Image (cartoon, grey):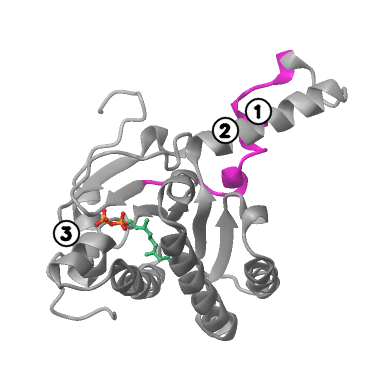
Amino acid sequence: MSLSNKAPAPLDMDNIPRHIAIVMDGNGRWARKRGLPRKAGHSAGSETFHRAAELLAELGVEHMTVYAWSTENEEKRPPEETREIMGLLERYLKKSVRELTENNIQLDFWGNTAALSPKLQALIAQTDEISKRCTGMQVHICMNYGGRDEILRAARALAQDCAAGLIRPEQIDEKALESRMYCRRTPPPDLLIRPGGEQRLSNFLLWECAYSEFYFTDVLWPDFDEEQIRLAIAAFQRRTRRFGGLTE
Ligand code: FPP
């Protein structure tokens, strides 16, 4: 995916969202419509992810966060589908280890990665090492992730620090909680995109999305191409953000 001259939606390059979060939904339906197994949808979805990351980096987006696999997916989907997603991630990371420096993109993982296979954990560690040398867009891949779980883990860490006398209960504020969350070094998403027709968060970035603008579309994730990305950003640019205040 590259920036073409015949772009459908002209964008205000001075108002590109710093952080875009995406729920990559609709892979299964995309495959079913073509009489293919679900794994073909996930495979097409991972290619869309790769192209979208390149395009967002070209547009100057600083952070992209994607929902790849949730704590609920892990519990409720057949083990075979979990294996397929882990296989896709493994292939993607092997490729990324070669290409990351070239693209100057940093990758990091949000979620319970300690529960992933030793092979994936080793690849993630290798990716982290390489990412430290990159200075471009940061891509946060939510894997085995749940928004409630993220908040719960931070609350537990705070309770432990309280018990250890490192912080007093009256010192606990939003900053203290957030400093124990995956998002601690990332600005909140300006724009959350959910393709695939559903209009809900599904336990994604519950804390972070307090003031994000939401963009929903029926287009299925594997079909989410450059035109769709531009349409989503153009919609964002038409919104008035008030953050609880008043419009001037
Ligand atoms: C939701 O579609 C999609 C997922 C649960 C998995 C998304 C994962 C990928 C795109 C691959 C991740 C890989 C990398 C490299 C980050 P669904 O299966 O729920 O679709 P449906 O609602 O149409 O059934």
**Residue 205: x and y, percent?**
45, 41
Q: Which residues are magenta?
A: 170-190
Q: Is residue 52 left or right of residue 84?
A: left
Q: Is residue 95 magenta?
A: no
* Mark 1 vs 2: CB contact within 8 A: yes
> Distance between the Cα atoms at labels 1 and 2?
6 Å
Residue position for label 2: 151
> Distance between the Cα atoms at labels 2 and 3?
31 Å
Badge 3 marks a residue whose secondary structure is: loop
Residue position for label 1: 155
Residue position for label 3: 219
Q: Is residue 177 magenta?
A: yes
Pointer 1 local density, CA inside 10 Å: few below 14, some 14–19, many at least 20: some
Q: Quadrant of ligand 1?
A: bottom left
Residue at position x 67%, y 54% in the image = 114
Question: Amino acid under label 1?
Answer: Ala
User: Eyeballing the image, is 174 above or below 134?
Assistant: above
User: Eyeballing the image, is 141 above or below 31?
Assistant: above
Viewer-nearest residue: 204 or 189: 204
* Mark 3 vs 1: CB contact within 8 A: no
Question: Amino acid under label 2?
Answer: Ile
Which mark, residue 66? none
**Lower position in the chain sequence, tag 3 or tag 1:** 1
Viewer-nearest residue: 116 or 208: 116
Pointer 3 local density, CA inside 10 Å: few below 14, some 14–19, many at least 20: some
